[in-house]
Image: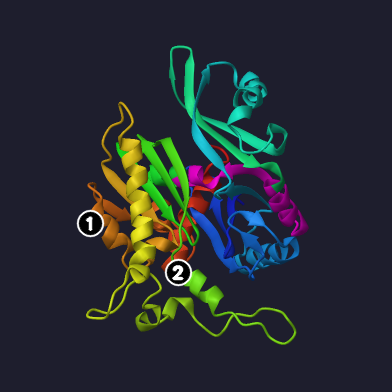
Amino acid sequence: MARSHVGVEITEESVRAVEVSVERQPQVVAYGEVALPPDAAHDSEVLDQGAVATAIRDLWSTAKIRAKSATLGIANRRVLVREHSTVAIAPELLRQALPFQVQDLLPVPVAQAVLDYYPTAQHGDQLHGLLVAAVSSTIEDMITAFGRAKIRIDGVDLATFGLARAAALVAPEGTAAVIHIGDHTTQIVILRNGIPDFVRITPVDLETVAVRRRNTRIAPEDGTFAAARVDPTRVAAAELVGAAGIVPMGALRSDASTRPVADVIGRIRSTLAFYLNKDGVPPITQVLITGAGAAVDGVAPGLAATLDAPLRTVVLHDVLPLHVADPTGDLALNLVSTAGLALGKDR
């Protein structure tokens, strides 16, 4: 039986995973997503280990994931990602020197941070790349939740690098802006010939299907939470009016109603403009969008009308062939970065 790798992410709304076969032509052999109860997690931070561990066990069972280990992706607003240049030295020496080089850049003491460095280019004896710093307690809590579910975490990666890895299979050449618009966080990575050159993680406040599903949850008398009987793939369009600041034609509009979509489009546009204002960067030749927020009314058309490069929506089957049924709706959009995490273990 062929071996496989699993990429997994914890978001505020759910735990999701993709299992990818290890062969010359990798393919998706399993995937799934299990919703989390309210206040179990925030961004990529675990608040209730028991609830998250239960969701992980349910995910492995319902998705029929065979592997008992996974690569964990993190993406929240407390993760620091910034350009960093250093003297080119052996990787093991760089790992030892990095804490001393960047301690003044970190929002927490270096002893409380987990550091990684992603080299992107070398010019002479100078190595250029992306510094990633996360709060160690956040990662430890996530790993503990998986341990309680009997799943071993054998690698931790920035979810945005998973997104970049997946997008590089779709756009291996040129300069591409890749944007995952999630339920609460937007990840933006600029690829130059498939290599990450720039990363930003920003907040987003869109009412995706998952957010709407959470808002329909009710608390019974026993204090536990259960989802109301709403099929997120069949929510009537009329019920979503206002979720993204979109109102029927002819209805009264206000700044408050249009702000969520306009805000996310404005943040994306300003982030891309900031990158393009850097010295020596080439123009962006295409924009790839994914994530549940990309399906919210007004987001994709608004970005297409605002940005100068062609825009394309990417789903899981654009990245890898599937040995199982194709996911639909928001799940097909959300699993792109998760699949990239699975691809990253040996790449």
Give the answer, above or below, for where 12 lies relative to 179.
below
Q: Is residue 90 magenta?
A: no
Q: Tell me, for residue 305, which label it has, or none.
A: 1
Q: Is residue 14 left or right of residue 126?
A: right
* Residue drawn at point x = 75 percent, y = 52 percent: 144
* Residue under pointer 2: 207
294 vs 58, nearest the viewer: 294
Label 1 SS:
helix
* Residue drawn at point x = 72 percent, y = 47 percent: 140
Give the answer, above or below, for where 279 lies relative to 162.
above
Q: Is residue 152 magenta?
A: yes
- For badge 1, the amino acid type reads Ala
Label 2 SS:
loop
Q: Is residue 148 visible?
A: yes
View extreme (front): residue: 255
Q: Which residues are magenta?
A: 138-163
Q: Main secondary structure of the magenta part?
A: helix
274 vs 23, nearest the viewer: 274
* Inter-mark Cα distance, 2 to 1: 21 Å
244 vs 319, nearest the viewer: 244
Q: Is residue 119 visible?
A: no
Q: Is residue 54 left or right of residue 329?
A: right
Q: What colour scheme governs how the chains and residues are painted in the rendered image of this protein?
A: rainbow
Q: Tell me, for residue 253, which label it has, or none.
A: none
Q: Position of residue 71 (x, y in %)?
A: 61, 47
Q: Earlier in the sequence, mark 2 or mark 1?
A: 2
